[in-house]
Image (spheres, coloured by chain):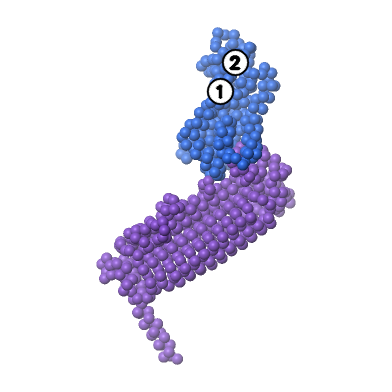
Amino acid sequence: MLKILKYSFMDLMRSRWSYVYFFFYLVLGFVLFFLNSDVTKAVITLMNVIIVLTPLIGTIFGVMYFYSSREFTELLLAQPLKRKTIFAGQYLGVSLSLSMSLVVGVGIPFVIYGIFGSAAIWDFSTLLLVGAFLTFIFVALSFNLALAFKDRIKGFGFSILMWLFMAVIYDGLFLLSMMIFDDYPLDKLALGATLFNPIDLSRILILLKLDISALLGYTGAVFKNFFGTGLGLLLSLIMLSVWVLIPGALMLRQAEKKDF
Amino acid sequence: MKIEKLLIIGLLLASSLSAASRTVGAEEALTSIGEAMKVSAPGDTIFIQPGTYREETIYIDKPLVIIGRDYPVIDGMNKGYILEVRSDSVTVKGLMLINVQKSYTKAYSAIHVYGSKNFVIEDNKLRNSFFGILIERSKEGLIRGNRVIGNAVTEQSSGNGIHAWHSDRLTISDNHVEGMRDGIYLEFVNKSEIVGNLSRNNVRYGLHFMFSNDDRYLQNRFENNGAGVAVMFSKRIDMRQNEFALNWGSASYGLLLKEILEGEIVDNTFHRNTIGISADGASKITFSHNNFDNNGWAIRFHGACYDNDITKNNFRHNALDISYKGPINGNVFDQNYWSEYAGYDLDKNNVGDVPYRPVKLFSYVVNKTPETIILLRSLFVDIINFSEKVSPIMTPDNLKDNRPLMKPVEIDDRS
């Protein structure tokens, strides 16, 4: 598995798109500091970008890589190798290289502008951790979809739809249900609903880290009591890990059974 | 004629000579301040030498001038009030007052002024005082340059820094109040001025008005209090050039207006408060030339706000500029600068050509269902805000600034 991981990783490291992705974050980081040298504010702006963009890039890259390396995968399948090792290796290779582009790309400008001396270091590390988690989650989800559809167009379409659902539609339904049921106590529902969407969960985790949390009023206090404690943080990290593990496991199971 | 003049001068001299000056100190004839009060005559000046004086409540029942040299420490030993001022024309200056009894039934304070006129309380330092300076039924007093520092934890077990009740024409200036319940509290206090004070880290409000009319407060700074300033049930309050900063917490705000009529809020700065101004039942108020920057909400109008005039303010980088309930009620938004304004100005007259709508759809939704605030900064919210901006459906149609400014208004604040 390590060999396949290494191969996929090196393959992507050599690919142009990894560099584009890496330079995008690098430039974004520098531009943020050029416009405003306050590290805390840069973290907030970056949050908005990372929450939307890492899932999208993870999805598109995952599908793209899966389809483009399909022939190579078929070649590997002809070898005496376990299917699990092949797909797990490819999955980890893609996720790791994307996460690395993110961490290094954003990390360099922040290190240069003195993140280590700043109080925002923890917010920043949470942000990167969450970004990496989102990458892993959405690559796994997109691999699932790519495995399910042989047709590229269908695979792409459903992946984008999945991203759209998680990033936009879910929140819309969430908002709508809260408005419809606003005669009932909603904070438990809101708490539950955020746990079931990794993008929302990440957003709340970072929002609560930043002092903007005071805006959230009473609901914020409920959330802060939950996520702000060590237990809440642990639970949300566990939840994010579950979001990685379940799609990952599903993907492997599907790969085992699929007739290539 | 000449003789009469001479007589008058002679009389004046005699009266001024009769006002003796006495000194209290460890090595003086008088060693306790209480004793000095008994032997002194009206109009005397009493100097207090440096040192520590352990005194029970000291009554000042005649016009006296009490001046401390190098802040002599008067220790109330946690027994009731320290200084009880019960006479007109008393001056208390340069003392360090410590240890006032805590009580849940009586408002014990370091300096208690009752029924006095023309008093001066200046340049004192108060530590561990339950209430700091308590003024009741008094007129024309000056409270200047005092430092009241406490370590209040809860509202129930702490007192106010400067507390005035049923008093008129007071001047409260250049004081520093920190770590008390309310920094400055005024109840039934009319025609008074509160100038240049610093009130911070107080458990409840920096400055609190109740049933007080015709007062002015200007050039004060309110920082990191439970809430900055609360103005309640008062009329004609003039608020100028104050700074409301860092009043940050889940139920915190810079300025609370509750049942207020005809005030003026001009040239103030609201910086990094959860809510800049929270207005509930505030009517006929002029808000102009204020800076609102980096607040959660710049202004939150709850209900029953009529005929307010919000003109020529700067709204910069607030998470939500205005939150509004109900119909427009004669409130006017005009010629403000909004950092989120995305319109254009073809004729270059510094007035945008398309109106600005300060109430976002999301802010409207949050007002209806507060729990939805949890979706703040999500992509979905950005999308619905944008679509509402393009074609407003939900937000009040006539709530808009028809002449938004392209450049910020020059503001005459203190900085």
User: Label 2 marks which chain's residue?
Assistant: A
Left or right for B207, reference B86:
right
Q: Amino acid at mark 1?
A: Ile
Identify the hue of chain A: blue
- The residue type indicated by label 2 comes to Ala
Q: Residues within 10 Å of mark 1 (few under 14, many from 20)?
A: some
Which residue is drawn at the image coordinates 55% and 41% (left, top)? A219
At which x and y percent is residue B277?
A: 58, 53
Helix, strand or loop status at disc 2? helix
Residue B298: percent from left, percent from top: 59, 50
Viewport quadrant of the C terminus of chain A: top right
| Residue in view at x 65 percent, y 53 percent | B336
- The foreground one among B292 and A28 is B292
Please give the residue where the numbered disc 2 appears in the rendered image: A255
B85 w.r.t. B357: above or below: below
Q: Which residue is mark 1?
A: A246
| Colour used to depict chain B in the structure image | purple
B47 vs A50, left or right, is: left
Write the residue at 69% across / 57% down.
Answer: B330
| Left or right: residue B414 compared with residue B397 | left
Image quadrant in which you'd find residue A165: top right
Q: Secondary structure at mark 1?
A: helix
- Chain of the residue on which disc 1 is drawn: A
